[in-house]
Amino acid sequence: MRRLIRPGLIQLAAAALAWLWFAPLAEPLAWSSLAALVAVALAMACRIAAPARWLYALLWPTVAMALTLALPPWLYLAALALTLGLGRNAFSERVPLYRSNLRVVEALAERLPQGAALLEAGCGDARLALALARRRPDLTITGVENAWLAWAWAKWRWFAAGRPAAVRIRFASLWRCDWHGYHAIYVFLSPAPMPRVWARFLQGAEAGALLISNSFTVPGVTADETLPLGGPLQRALYLWRRPHGAC
């Protein structure tokens, strides 16, 4: 909840400042456009990272558009349910819903040892887990997801794929599930939780296990191995091996 305070204050301040020049109900387009610009400027002043700061421009133009269209109330509830169902972790953990691409599948298929057990901590729609299971049927893959709509989507895809025995999809938080017993843990999250991921890995994974992160590094910890992906967004896989005796 604390993580929502600063974005909320920025948006409220942007709306209030824009109100000094334009009345929201009389000139919704001008007011929302100015509020969007002010929100981005405030986000830049607060040193919010470049990809995220542009999202601050979306709120008030969306509100103005909705008011202009006079949409029925149930659509707002549906939009809220969809947002929370798919992206609740963007609010609570600063982790958007990312989908791993096929280059990641190929890289993992080549790198993981024979018969490995893989935990995908935050599996989204299970795209990676199911594709990797088809590519490497010797693997045992467990995907955990705690956004209920993303989990339901993953479960549906698992059923549609014929309920492969080598893949398990669980509704659970990656922080509360057991990381022990896996040869590798794969994450595709964001920079924000990576220090906590590293601490959880050292505490919960077994000795010799691999932590594999798509695109995001652990601050202050050099990766033992890097597998380039060549994409503009999904750039590389970073691998760390848990040392013996770590605590």
Image (spheres, helix red, strand yellow):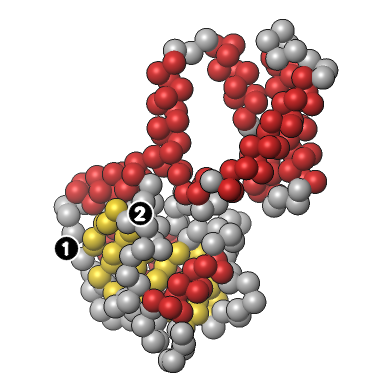
Q: Amino acid at mark 1?
A: Ala
Vertical placement of 10 versus 180: above or below?
Answer: above
Q: Is residue 191 visible?
A: yes
Instruction: Determine crowd level at label 2: few under 14, some 14-19, many 20+ residues with C-alpha closer than 10 A.
Output: many
Depth order, front residue of 138/68: 68
Q: Residue at x 59, y 61 (%)?
A: 191
Q: Residue furthest front?
A: 2
Q: What's the CA distance linking mark 1 and mark 2?
A: 18 Å
Q: Residue at x 46, y 85 (%)?
A: 247
Which picture quadrant has residue 220?
A: bottom right
Point out which mark residue 165 bears.
Answer: 1
Q: Residue at x 19, y 48 (%)?
A: 159
Instruction: Determine crowd level at label 1: few under 14, some 14-19, many 20+ residues with C-alpha closer than 10 A.
Output: few
Q: Which element type, helix, strand or loop, lies under badge 2?
A: strand
Q: Earlier in the sequence, mark 1 or mark 2?
A: 2
Report which residue position mark 2 lands on.
145
Which picture quadrant has residue 43?
A: top right
Vertical placement of 94 versus 139: above or below?
Answer: above
Which picture quadrant has residue 32?
A: top right
**Horizontal and vertical percent for residue 217?**
58, 69
Q: How many numbered circles does the render carry?
A: 2
Q: Is residue 112 visible?
A: no
